[in-house]
Amino acid sequence: MTGTILFKRVAGNDLPLPTYATPGAVGMDLRAFLPDGPVVFYRGDTHLISTGFHVELPRDTEMQIRPRSGLALKHGLIVPNSPGTVDEDYRGIVMVGLHLLGADPVTVSHGDRIAQAVFAPVLRLGAQEAQTLSDTARGSGGFGSTGRG
């Protein structure tokens, strides 16, 4: 599936448009728009970081905001509501929530790659109340009910 995502800059945004780092990358890199200076994260801190862009998605598309693996694994900087969802009708500034699990402080500066955006098709299904549901081998077995390994 291919298409076009429209990005509108906020005033003063000098960042490049979100882009894929390699031809095989799934997510577009999102950068921190921090014209007033860096943000320092200490263990347990959560900050909402602007990307400096509004977005317009194609119909029946969502934008998922996911952590960058390097920041998450090396520094413990995660997207706490991962994946964050941007709806197709949202026109506000795309913001990224970041939370530091790691012990060492992490500084996020203007232009740093902080997350990735993955685009996915959306199904809109109707809801219908039912008195019974079909049987399956799993049934109502929940967390861990299918075993380990």
Image (cartoon, rainbow, N blue to C red):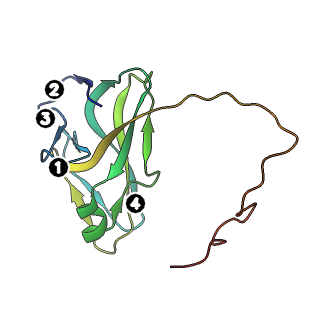
- Within 10 Å of the Cα at label 2, are there few (<14), some (14-19), or many (20+) other Cα atoms? few
| Residue drawn at 83 percent across, 37 percent down | 130
Q: CA distance from mark 2 to mark 4?
A: 27 Å
Q: Which mark is residue 12?
A: 2
Image quadrant in which you'd find residue 56: top left
> Looking at the rendering, which quadrant does residue 59 occupy?
top left
Q: Residue furthest right?
A: 131
Q: CA distance from mark 1 to mark 4?
A: 18 Å
First in sequence: mark 1 or mark 2? 2
Disc number for residue 45: 4
Residue name at image x 27 percent, y 61 percent: 69
Mark closer to the observer (1, 4): 1
Q: Residue at x 27, y 56 (%)?
A: 68
Q: Badge 1: few (under 14), some or many (20 or more) residues near its Cα, within 10 Å?
A: some
Secondary structure beneath dot 3 equals loop
* Amino acid type of the residue that numbered disc 4 sits on in the rendered structure: Asp
**Foreground disc of the pair 3, 4:** 3
Mark 3 residue type: Leu
Residue 23 in the image: x percent, y percent?
A: 13, 44
Image quarter for residue 11? top left
Q: Is residue 24 above or below residue 149?
A: above
Residue hosting label 3: 15
143 or 8: nearer the viewer? 143
**Residue topped by disc 1:** 112
Please tell me how crowded label 3 is: few (under 14), some (14-19), or many (20+) other residues with Cα within 10 Å.
Answer: some
Give the Cα distance between marks 1 and 2. 16 Å
Q: Is residue 34 above or below residue 67?
A: above
Note whether 133 is above or below 14 in the view shown.
below
**Amino acid at the residue labelled 1:** Asp
